[in-house]
Image (cartoon, rainbow, N blue to C red):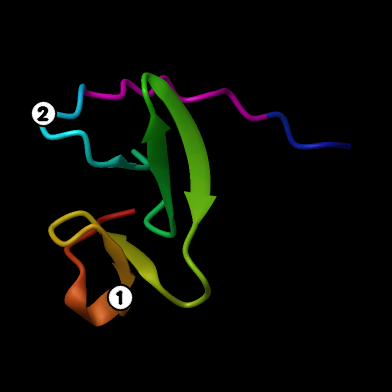
Amino acid sequence: MDEVTTPVPVVCPESPNGFLVFVPHPTDCTKYYECFGDIPILMDCAPPLYWDASINVCNWPSEVDCQQ
């Protein structure tokens, strides 16, 4: 049986300076969204890294404040 997942609503905020906007995934520390305008594109960090929203890069889990 295939696992059914419910999409998580993601809102991309407007970029105040024209740079890319990143949004952390709400339930998975290994994922994040890269916003292309108002369209969120799901991205994955390489294992075993977690998304670090404080510096907008994938980082070691011990350095990231993320509760799954």
Of label 1 and label 2, which has the lower sequence position? 2
Tell me the kind of residue under disc 1.
Answer: Pro
Pointer 1 residue: 61
Name the residue: 38% across, 33% down: 35
Secondary structure found at label 1:
helix
Name the residue: 16% across, 62% down: 55
Figure check: 51 above or below 59: above
* Residue 34: mark in rendering: none
- Quarter of image, res 21: top left
Front in this rendered view, residue 19 or 52: 19
Secondary structure found at label 2:
loop
Question: Which quadrant is home to the N terminus?
Answer: top right
Please provide the residue range marked out in magenta.
5-13
Q: Where is residue 43 in the image (x, y as percent from the top left)?
A: 50, 49
21 displayed left or right of 41: left
Rounded to the nearest whole Å, what is the CA distance between mark 1 and mark 2? 29 Å
6 displayed left or right of 21: right
Q: Where is residue 3 in the image (x, y as percent from the top left)?
A: 75, 37
Front in this rendered view, residue 33 or 49: 33
Q: Position of residue 27 (x, y in %)?
A: 39, 43
Tell me the kind of residue under disc 2.
Answer: Pro
Figure check: 38 above or below 67: above
Name the residue: 31% across, 80% down: 60
52 displayed left or right of 32: left
Q: Position of residue 20 (x, y in %)?
A: 29, 41
Q: How crowded is mark 2: few (under 14 residues within 10 Å), some or many (20 or more)?
A: few
Pointer 2 residue: 16
Name the residue: 43% across, 59% down: 30
- Quarter of image, res 23: top left
- Quarter of image, res 66: bottom left
